[in-house]
Image (cartoon, rainbow, N blue to C red):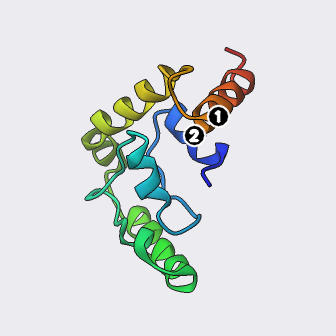
Amino acid sequence: FISEKTFKPIAALQPFVIVGSKHSLKYLRKLGYKTFSPYIDESYDELEDGERMAAIAKSIRKILEIEDKVAWYESMRDIVEHNHNLFMEIGPKKSQEHIAISNYYYEYFNV
């Protein structure tokens, strides 16, 4: 299950780490979104619950250690723009999850 918490950073052109179910990133890629490997260690997506949480924490610690976060972000600009554009073009041709999240987005951001 992918919640609105995943789509908020997508709508806001931000990279993200998903603290969620195993294969959440795999599912997002299936929907057409790009994820952030090698900029973020996404190996956590393949792990079971206990191991996944430790790996997520390790990935976040690595992000915190990046000195030039502006340059780091700029290196991912094509990914965040792709994801944002995909999110914004969502329509009836997309899954029910997309429709529900896009409705939430438009309501949340008052668009």
**Which amino acid type is marked by label 1?**
Ile
Label 2 element class = helix
Q: Is residue 56 left or right of residue 33?
A: right
Name which quarter of the figure residue 62 lies in.
Answer: bottom left
Question: Where residue 78 is drawn, which disc sits there?
Answer: none
Relative image position of residue 44 (x, y in whole percent): 43, 72
- Residue sitting at 72 percent across and 17 percent down? 110
Q: Which residue matches tag 2?
A: 7
CB under 8 Å between discs 2 and 1? yes
Name which quarter of the figure residue 79 lies in.
Answer: top left
- Work out whether residue 91 or residue 53 is closer to the camera in this orientation and state it: 91
- Residue sitting at 49 percent across and 71 percent down? 56
The quadrant of the image that shows the N terminus is: bottom right
Relative image position of residue 9 (x, y in whole percent): 54, 40
Q: Measured along the vertical axis of the image, is residue 76 above or below residue 60? A: above
Relative image position of residue 21 (x, y in whole percent): 57, 66
Q: Which residue matches tag 1?
A: 101
For label 2, count other residues whose C-alpha is less than 10 Å away and answer few (under 14), some (14-19) or many (20+): many
**Which amino acid type is marked by label 2?**
Phe
Mark 2–mark 1 Cα distance, whole angstroms, equals 7 Å
Label 1 element class = helix
- Earlier-in-chain disc, 2 versus 1: 2
For label 1, count other residues whose C-alpha is less than 10 Å away and answer few (under 14), some (14-19) or many (20+): many
The quadrant of the image that shows the C terminus is: top right
